[in-house]
Image (spheres, grey):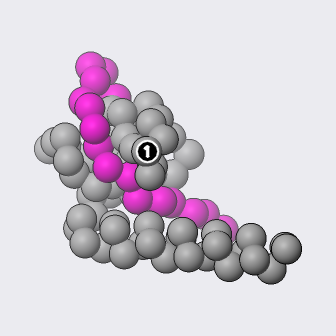
Amino acid sequence: MCLSVPAEVTELLPGDMAIVSFDGVSLEISSALIGDLAVGDYVLVHVGYALAKIDPAEAERTLELLQELGSVAQELRS
C-alpha cells in the first residue's frame, strides 16, 4: 500500500526541485512530475516526489484528519 500526504509548496528550486512544508516541517522534494507549480500550491507527496496538485481545502481537510488519527492513536497507547 502506498501513502501520499499533502504538503504546501513554500519554495521553488532549480532542477525541478521544491521545498514543501508538512505542518511546519520542511522537506526538499522533486517536482519533476508536475508542471506549472507555484509557491502556495498544495501537492501530494510520496517518497520525495510531488505526484499531483490538489485543492487547498481538500489538503487542509486531509491534514486535519491525519492529526485526528494521530491523536486517537496516541490515546489508545496511553
Residue at 44% x, 31% y: name it. 28
Query: Looking at the image, which residue is at 75% across and 77% down?
Result: 75
Magenta residues, as a range?
Answer: 1-17
* Farthest-out residue, right: 78
Residue 65 in view of the camera: yes
Quadrant into which the C terminus falls: bottom right
Q: Is residue 67 magenta?
A: no
Residue kind at label 1, given as amino acid type:
Gly
* Residue 30 appears in view: no
Residue 60: image x %, image y %?
34, 68
| Local crowd size for mark 1, using a 10 Å CA cut-off: few (<14), some (14–19), many (≥20) | few
Q: Quadrant of residue 33?
A: top left
Whether residue 46 is situated above or below residue 55 in the rendered picture: above
Residue 57 position in % (x across, y down): 25, 72
Which residue in the protein does label 1 denote?
24
Asked whether, in this view, residue 14 is left or right of residue 2, the answer is left
Instruction: Give the quadrant of the N terminus.
Output: bottom right
Quarter of image, res 12: top left
Q: 64 and 16: which one is in front? A: 64
Does 4 sit above or below residue 47?
A: below
Residue at image position (44%, 67%) is 63
Q: Is mark 1 on a helix, strand or loop?
A: loop
